[in-house]
Amino acid sequence: MTLTSKELLLIQDNIKMTENTAKFMEGCAEIVTDPQVKSMCQQMAREHRSDIQMLLKHINSATM
């Protein structure tokens, strides 16, 4: 499957937004003292990192 340049730009923008959200959640996890909230922030950051990897796979498979 080939991506159009517009689709590629949209995916790249989504990766940037997801990266920013993951960094934000990691920062929150460092600040909070409640163990449950810290765990939830860490989990959300991991999920966003996983989403980034999935998006990168789409880009890589489309450019091959």
Image (cartoon, helix red, strand yellow):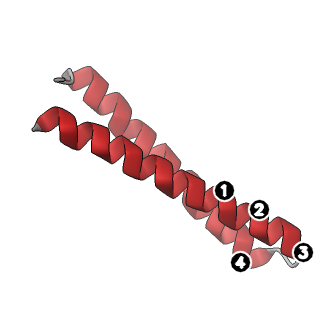
> From the viewer's perspective, is 35 left or right of 62?
right
| Disc marking residue 18 | none
| Disc marking residue 44 | 1
Estimate the spatial distance between the alpha carbons at disc 3 and disc 4, rounded to whole Å.
11 Å
Q: Is residue 19 visible?
A: no
Asked where in the image residue 3 lies, by quadrant, the reply is top left
* CB under 8 Å between discs 3 and 4: no
Q: Which is more N-terminal, label 1 or label 4? A: 4
Q: Nearer the viewer, mark 4 or mark 2?
A: 2
Estimate the spatial distance between the alpha carbons at disc 3 and disc 2, rounded to whole Å.
10 Å
> From the viewer's perspective, is 27 left or right of 52?
right
Q: Residue at x 55, y 52 (%)?
A: 48
Asked where in the image residue 47 lies, by quadrant, the reply is bottom right
| Disc marking residue 34 | 3
Q: Residue at x 49, y 57 (%)?
A: 49
* CB under 8 Å between discs 4 and 1: no
* CB under 8 Å between discs 1 and 2: yes
Depth check, front residue: 42 or 33: 42
Residue under pointer 2: 40
Mark 1 neighbour class, 10 Å CA radius: few under 14, some 14 to 19, many 20 or more: some
* CB under 8 Å between discs 3 and 1: no
Q: Residue at x 87, y 79 (%)?
A: 33
Say which element carries label 3.
loop
Q: Please, what is the three-letter code of the amino acid marked with disc 1? A: Met
Q: In the image, residue 39 lies at what x, y percent?
A: 76, 69
Estimate the spatial distance between the alpha carbons at disc 4 and disc 2, rounded to whole Å.
12 Å
Q: Please, what is the three-letter code of the amino acid marked with disc 2? A: Met
Estimate the spatial distance between the alpha carbons at disc 4 and disc 1, rounded to whole Å.
13 Å
Q: Which is more N-terminal, label 2 or label 4? A: 4
Mark 2 neighbour class, 10 Å CA radius: few under 14, some 14 to 19, many 20 or more: some
